[in-house]
Image (cartoon, grey):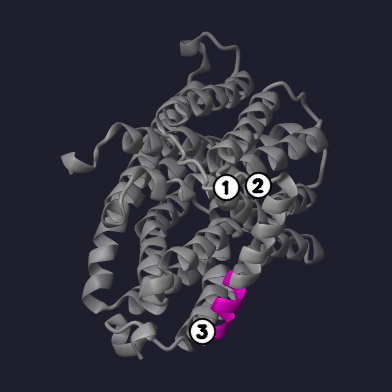
Amino acid sequence: MKRYLSRPVIAWAFYDWANSAFATTVMAGFFPLFFKQYWASGLDSTASTFQLGVGNAVASLFIVLAAPLLGAMADRGGLRKRFLFLFALLGVACTALLGGVGAGQWAAALALFVAATVGFMGANVFYDALLTVVAREEEWDMVSALGYALGYLGGGLLFGVNVAMTLSPESFGLADPAEAVRYAFFSVALWWALFSLPLLLMVKEPPVAQRLSAWAVACAGYRQVCETFRHIRALRPVFLFLIAYWLYIDGVDTIVRMAVDYGLAIGLEQGHLIGALLITQFVGFPAALVFGAVGQRIGARRGIFIAIGVYVGVTLWAAVISEPWEFYVLAACIGLVQGGIQALSRSLYARLIPTDKAAEFFGFYNMLGKFAALLGPLMVGYIGVALDSHRAGMLSLILLFVAGAWLLARVEVAGEGRERLADR
């Protein structure tokens, strides 16, 4: 492991430590909680869930439309690091501004949340792309794992502190839990900005061979996106897998983003919801390693089917729960498979793509993963409003998991992944 720990690698990995605070404290934890109880307290419960679902979907849709072109432009123009910090700055600024939004101002809070989420997801596109800059190809798996590990630890650490602030605000010199949540938003912005500095200072992007004008970079980026998409469409198993992946990972990310809102809607106390999120955070990393070993023994696709089955079971149970202990058990179940389904999806995809186009295909895969939580939040919000039932809205996610599994079953994996399609 020591030979991988160069200064650029550590600096790069610490950006995951930096921005994971937003994913845990803001996206999954305090924003949906504060949105329903404080900013949107005057709205009907199903209406606030619908607004939150729309906000998440709008942020994802922006990345769907913009990220592939921006990513290709960054590759062509040597702008990956610059784009990363522009998006990160957007996320940091909007997260800090959330702390100043007053009670009842749900539209302003939602707009800032959407902008901050765009900053978070947009910056991650270019963060992933910088992996090839800080490490050699044979080091990518280990260095990528280091980033994930620091993300789990950093995000969980600050989230734990923020939870303590809300449970005992007087211990931190704060007036009440509402003030603690506002300071939690400020702490995330500061944490994100501070731990982004190592990447800014220590990671150097290689100069491009030829400087192009902004228009030339945009045109070259557009051509690259079209070429990559043509390659993917030409390989039916890869194309089917990517659609399947997008469907079931959309369900996974929707559960992460909407779980707290759902728990509040069915009457669970916020302390239990936050505690459950902490369980998911700290169970997730070691469980991902164990799940990866299981997938290696029985095959990546079978492992993904098991994970999807767990998510279907979780969704069915979530639709009927009423006790806090049930939410804790559901959180632990999600933690057991959340990292595993991501890890096995990546390894299965590696077995499907042509070896000589690995970087190109993985670039598209990584972008697609950032587009998740587009259909799911809209389904949960719309069906919840249409049927006046949060539980019905949650049940709708089963459609994403079943459709994803159905398509995945139709993906041809040569020799259970031992032979690449390129070798056929």
Residue under the point 56% across and 64% down: 251
Amino acid under label 2? Answer: Leu
Q: Which residue is mark 3?
A: 235
Confirm whether residue 259 shows in the render: no
Is the magenta region chiefly helix, strand or loop? helix
Q: Could you tell me which secondary element the residue under label 2 belongs to?
A: loop
Depth order, front residue of 337/211: 211
Examine the image and state in which quarter residue 416 appears.
bottom left
Which residue ends up furthest to the top in the rendered image? Answer: 173
Which residue ends up furthest to the front in the rendered image? Answer: 210
Q: Which residue is mark 1?
A: 210
Q: Could you tell me which secondary element the residue under label 3 belongs to?
A: loop
Depth order, front residue of 215/54: 215
Taking the magenta stretch, the answer to whether it contains residue 132 is no
10 Å neighbourhood of mark 1: few (<14), some, or many (≥20)?
A: few
Residue under the point 66% across and 27% down: 93
The reply to whether dot 1 and dot 2 touch (C-beta < 8 Å) is: yes
The Cα atoms of the two marked residues, 3 and 1, are separated by: 32 Å
Taking the magenta stretch, the answer to whether it contains residue 233 is yes
Quadrant where the C terminus sits is bottom left
Left or right position of 35 against 423: right
Residue under the point 32% across and 47% down: 135
Extent of the magenta region: 228-234
Q: Which mark is residue 212?
A: 2
Residue 46: x percent and y percent? 76, 53
Amino acid under label 1? Answer: Gln
Residue 396: x percent and y percent? 65, 70
Which residue ends up furthest to the left in the rendered image? Answer: 2
